[in-house]
Image: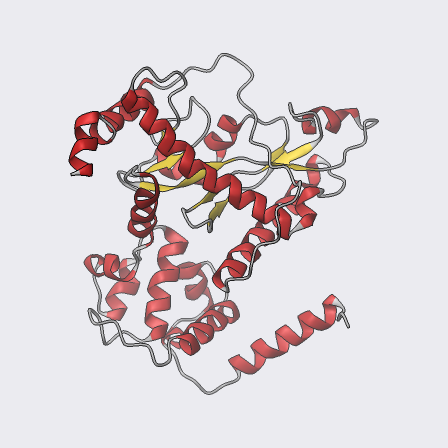
Amino acid sequence: MAFPLTVLLAAYEDLIEKELESEFSSCFDEYDDDSLFSLFHLTRPCLMFVADTMRARLQGVQPNTSHPHLSADALVMVTLNYYAHGISSASLLTKLGLTHTHCPAIIKAKSTVASNIEAVCGIPNVLGILASPHFRVRVSPYDKEDYGTFFSPLGYTAVVSQIICDSDGNILNVEKCEVGSTPEQEMWASSTKGKEIEKDMYGPYWLIGDLLGYCKYILTPVPDPSNESENRFNEAHAKIQGIMWATLSSLMRRFKVLLQLGFAKESSLDQKSNIIKACCVLHNIAKKFSVPSLPVGSEPVYPGKQHSGTLEVSDEALTARQALINRVFSALQMEKILK
């Protein structure tokens, strides 16, 4: 029997309240609600739910040998603080008796993602795989003001969202969706992740992408390869890019709502974005619990729209890509690897 959503939510809230009523004292108790939100961008009930879950899962696990004094709550605090700000807050580290030099031993997300991607395709220092898939929506053709903006070059009305995943198909980032006529390059330029990477906040890392004209941080394939080095690079690029499209295909098979997001107006984009983001979170949870994928069907996954005008390709991007190809995919380098 299916329970109404309100009953399920009530049960969930009751579970959280019982967790919070426990007499367990944690290092979160040393902060007021405003300080917690400033440090983690999450509320106290949400933080306690995460901490309680992690505490239960870490029972019986050997403590961190580098920092055996750190409790499960402290590890959660450092990680969530980093996720919230992109850098660990000095005040929190001081409180826990740590410095910024300790953080790489606790948070290894970037290097782990990069090493896993390099193991798959040979391209080093890649933070993730970038794509901007279209999701169908209904827009009345009589609503001429909205219809034109939602109409994609693929022949139907849609919204488009920017998504980044890793080599295992885990979704790392989802940006807000835009109307289907929005070029992928414009989405990148206005996205939070794009602005962060353009400001060099992540260091010497790349993203793998499909379309030309982004920036030096986006590795795109060579459009007309002229030698074996460029062919090898394109093969590696296609191999890792294929993981993104397989991930999106799996996402859309599991969550059919993404095949048709219902009626849309520009004023309802946030609602469509929330559905896409929720499905991405559930996708990651399903992978975490090794839930099997649904059988492959006929669900199409379409890439984002190329810029309609003449697009100026960044010289910096071309130079950076060529330097990578020469360094990693040249015949001499490949001989060294094979030896």
The location of residue 235, given as percent across then percent down, is: 37, 30
- Seen as rendered, the residue at the extreme right is 142
**Which residue is pictured at 77% across the width and 33% down the height?**
139
The residue at the point 19 percent across, 37 percent down is 337
Q: Nearer the viewer, residue 79 or 44?
A: 79
Q: Quadrant of the C terminus?
A: top left
Q: Is residue 318 above or below residue 50?
A: above
Displayed quadrant of residue 177: top right
Looking at the image, which residue sits at the far front? 339
Q: Name which residue lies at 41% across and 18% down.
A: 223
Foreground of the two, 133 or 183:
133
Between 240 and 68, the one nearer to me in the picture: 240
Residue 97 in the image: x percent, y percent?
22, 69
In the displayed structure, does residue 91 sit left or right of residue 30? left
Q: Is residue 50 left or right of residue 148?
A: left
Q: Residue at x 53, y 20 (%)?
A: 307
Which of the 4 image quadrants contains residue 217? Answer: top left
Q: Give the x, y percent position of residue 201.
A: 32, 41
Please say if 286 is above or below 44.
above
How far across and down, in percent of the image, does residue 142 sit? 84, 27
